[in-house]
Image: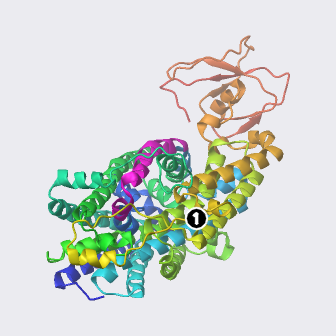
Amino acid sequence: MANLFEWPDYVVVAATLLFSVFIGIYYGCIAKQQTNDDLLLGGKSMGIAPIAASMLVTYLSAVTVLGYPAEVYGYGIQIFTNTISFIVVVPFSVYFFMTVFYKMQLTSVYEYLEHRFQSSFVRLFASFIFILQMTVFMGVCLYAPSIAMSAFMGLDLWQSVVGLGLCATVYTSMGGLKAVVWTDVFQLIMILAGMFAIIIRGFIKSGGIVEAFEKAGKHGRLELFNLTVDPFMRHNTLNFFLGTGFAIFTGFATHQPQVQRYCSLPSLGHAIKATIFAMPLNIFTIGLCLLSGIVIFSSYAGCDPMAIGTITRVDGIVPHFVKTELAFIPGMMGLFTACVFSASLSTLSSGLNSLAAVTWEDFLSRIPSLKRMSPKGQANLIRTVALAYGLLSIGLAFGAQRMGSILAATITALGALSGPLGMVFVMGVLMPFVNKYGAISGMVTGFLSMIWITINAFILDKSHIPMPFSAEDCPNEILQTINSTVTIAHVEELNFPEKLYTLSYILYPFVGGVITGAVGIVVSLFSGGICSAKNINPKYLHPLVQPRKTVKEKEMSYVTNAHYTRVIPATAPQYAKISPVSPTSSQYYNFESPTHSLVLGNGEKLPINDQSARPLLYRMPSSSSNRS
């Protein structure tokens, strides 16, 4: 395809890529990101606003910029139910998971699984699933910009894939998390600029805001809710809330890129504030993407490029609109290309940084010789790991072109594996009776089941037909051309087991989670999970399911935390009543136990093993007392 770029377009694209690389060079060579903590957690000194933007942009890939408008153009605005699910479910994810994991300050969230289930296999298998999930996802995200590249610049697939992949790999491996976060902020600005350009031009071409929405509504593009109950239907409201809702609930606060971001903040309060800030930002950005789809459809409502065969896939509509409607403005195609590039780079850099963190913490750090390396040597090794994943994602991008719709392919790649991965965290945090046998069998069964369904779905390759497109306002010469070539798509009804492979891709996380949870719970119950639940360290459980402490256990926790002063009275008291204590009071409490040890203020441990000994008293220090 001919190159449609002019020099202003090249300037905008080059400036975007070079600025992103410059940020990586700055944090890698000037700001001295020299340790694992710097590279993987930003030194735990990041600010709320950039982290909130990065939380959003991590998943605002080129798939979003190209896929969401194309989804609205071809299938309507039902995809916005994803965003509604996000707003409803994220607070629950924060409450149940973020409050637990932030306190642990884990570089790799999968370390939690080893401690909780006392099994290194659970941790390593979960890490493997994450690595597989993210590498496939990055391959799709790296492929998506090639659509814009081939439309505007006439570049081949390998040229755009290699160029973008190397750019993201360089600044991520050099600058670590700080470079990733600050390039995310810059790239969010570029994404918003590109979306605004499309929306403004689309409203002008459609005849105004009211006219645009009237045209979209007339052709069925504004139907948000569909209450049909059918798991094999591509999109409906129930499928969205079950599939997307489950994926967000289990994944938002447990997915490695997100965990790294909120753990890089100085406190849990800062992490919660960043999440709150990210929610309206998500609505605003996705709203712009949906508006883009509405105005693009309205612009072509009477003579649609899909109806006349100008484009053959709905994924090509956004580049087509920019090329035909914005090319007359100098630099505008460059701005949109930079927008797509920025969206891809943000996702790639986040994925590479997270993959490097998981690979180091869960695999490489277990090797004694690598563990003994200097902090600088470990940091350089992590840079090398990020570089290797960058090259792998470049290779996988060449296979992504066979995955159909880029939005559906991305949700499929994430959703097929997010169910088993997310459910093991649910079982760990909220189900004390689930043991390592249940976790292992559940994850393996869920993983293999979803891989089987996904592979067979791609082999079956059952395409979903978009909503109708109109050519009624096209010139006669165009109508004569399409009338002679138009064909009617035939939808074949399938029987089981083939019918199973047509399951809505939106439901993949939910189905994978249900399989994993059902197997995990049953196996745990039959392998003594209820009896072993009392041995779990409470810090690995959410407070709602932590075992209740007895009165003596509560009193002992006060003693061992040095909140009481040990006193041996001359005469044994006759009472042992426990009552609320005011911090300014000096009240005495009796603690009698032949099985516990006391920890004194100086760290000395005294066993209580003499049944005939006098009762011990503990005095709550007054506000003026020394509590050490």
Query: How many numbered marks does the figure carry?
Result: 1
Image location (x, y in percent) of residue 62: 37, 69
Q: Which secondary structure is most common in the magenta stretch?
A: helix
Does residue 389 sit above or below 211 in this rendering? Answer: below
- Amino acid identity at mark 1: Phe
Relative side of 335 to 531, left or right: left
Does residue 286 sit above or below 187 in this rendering? Answer: above
Q: Residue at x 75, y 41 (%)?
A: 533
Q: Residue at x 38, y 49 (%)?
A: 274
Q: Which residue is mark 1?
A: 130
Image location (x, y in percent) of residue 78: 40, 52
Relative side of 276 to 508, left or right: left
Does residue 203 sit above or below 321 in this rendering? Answer: above
Which corner quadrant holds the N terminus?
bottom left
- Please identify the quarter of the rendering in which residue 25 is found: bottom left
Image location (x, y in percent) of residue 350: 44, 67
SS category of the residue bearing label 1? helix
Q: Nearer the viewer, residue 557 or 442?
A: 442
- Please identify the quarter of the rendering in which residue 370 is found: bottom right
Image location (x, y in percent) of residue 421: 61, 57
Magenta stretch contains residue 65: no
- Please identify the quarter of the rendering in which residue 475 is found: bottom left
The magenta segment = 69-96
Q: Residue at x 71, y 18 (%)?
A: 569
Does residue 287 sit above or below 414 in this rendering? Answer: above
Q: Residue at x 54, y 68 (%)?
A: 462
Magenta stretch contains residue 87: yes
Res 392 seen here: yes
